[in-house]
Image: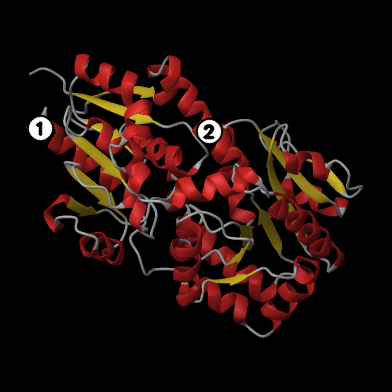
Amino acid sequence: MKTPILHVLYTAIGRGHPYYLDGVVTALTADYAERPAVRITDVFSLSHGLALTGWRMVRGIYRRGGQRGIGQAVYRILRSDHRPFGYGIGAGLLAGGIRKYFTAHPGPTLVAHPLVVPMIKDLVPVYYQHGEVSAPVQAAVDGAHRIFVPTEACKTRFVEQGITPDNLVVTGLCIESPLEKSAQNNYDNRQFRIEQAAFLSGAFFSSGAEPAEHVQSICTGAQALLRAGHQPLVYCAAGGRLEAALSRIAEAFRIRPDQDGFSFEKTLHERKILVVIYSGREALDRLTSLLFRYFDFIVAPSHERTNWAIGLGVPMFILHPVIGPFSPLNRRIMLDQSVAVDLHEPEALGETVTAMRTDGRLAAMARKGWGKYEIHGFAAVADYLVHDIGHVS
């Protein structure tokens, strides 16, 4: 029997959408009796001329999306208007090389961005992985063979927006494989530290766009946490705004957790803001998994790490402003479930953490984010694909 082929089409913009594809691709390496041959490509390698220029503009808008001025205005228009996700003039320009490729290479295709679904839905069976727990109107695109969603509530939202229920598959939360496998042990140890440890460790993350307000809040919050006797741990992209800002802080100290002989426990005596610098998604995920067991809480935008707060019992302090269509909805879900709080005063973060652990709120946030959802979403998507694509090829 011929091995089926699964195409995986990345937009390669930011971390969120590509992250969800990365997890499925990793899960497909499991020991299946018959698994598909995976063919990975991205919109940039398939596009040329005006289409490539258009995709570069989209990427540039994303990178400027969190900043003040024209970039932010254009970003909000693109991300808040439903029309760019239809197959109109703009999408038609971006679709040229992509449609040419899939005309020549038909077959089941996995995507994670709603923008590309209408571009190829008439050419190939499209599996659309919607990994976010929220479902803004921009995400509810029609025409996919199947749409993978993490929760029943998310499925309901898609149905309310006109998507046929039979096309929706609930998978559970999409959690990185190393974090999923160690989830119980990490949760137990986190709760023990929140209740009894001398100090707590907080991990800080920015979005890929690194909005100026987020960068300032991270730097201010990390310094406040250090002053209060807790341990800040900041992840930042090499060459980005956050790395530049941290370089101006005397207490910032770079660590390399993937080097031989590294000990996180020993670095705690440095009384520094510990900084982990990464290049690319793979490095970020690897460096995160190495230190995740030490995370007592996180400070981050309400993007894909919302999954940690509602599924792994990791309390979150939400960076502001919340930008784009997903972030405000994810924030609302976390606040409603009492697993996160807004970070409006980063200069008081240290005092806030101390007060919240003393009165039991931090431990309660962790408990409310544990055990409510299945957390094996990536494996569930991979299993579905393995057993389904042979019927639609």
Residue furthest out toward the front: 89
Question: Mark 1 touching mark 2, by CB under 8 A?
Answer: no
Q: Which residue is drawn at 42% across and 18% down?
A: 45
Determine whether, in the image, residue 266 is placed left or right of residue 72. Answer: right
Kindly tell me whether residue 39 is visible in this rendering: no
Q: Nearer the viewer, mark 1 or mark 2?
A: 2
Name the quarter where the N terminus is drawn: top left
Q: Residue at x 38, y 18 (%)?
A: 46
Q: In this view, does 321 lie above or below 61?
A: below
Nearest the eye: 35 or 98 = 98
Identify residue for label 1.
392
Name the quarter where the C terminus is drawn: top left
Residue 180, disc:
none
Q: How crowded is mark 1: few (under 14 residues within 10 Å), some or many (20 or more)?
A: few
Q: State which tag comes first along the sequence, 1 or 2.
A: 2
Q: Which amino acid does label 2 sit on?
A: Arg
Q: What residue type is labelled 1?
A: Val
Residue 59, disc:
2
Q: Which residue is drawn at 69% across and 59% down?
A: 202
Q: How far apart are marks 1 and 2 (CA)?
A: 32 Å
Secondary element at image label 1: helix
Quadrant of the rendered structure where residue 382 is?
A: top left
Picture coordinates of residue 76, whole percent (x, y) = 52, 51
Picture coordinates of residue 60, whole percent (x, y) = 57, 33
Kindly tell me whether residue 223 is visible in this rendering: yes
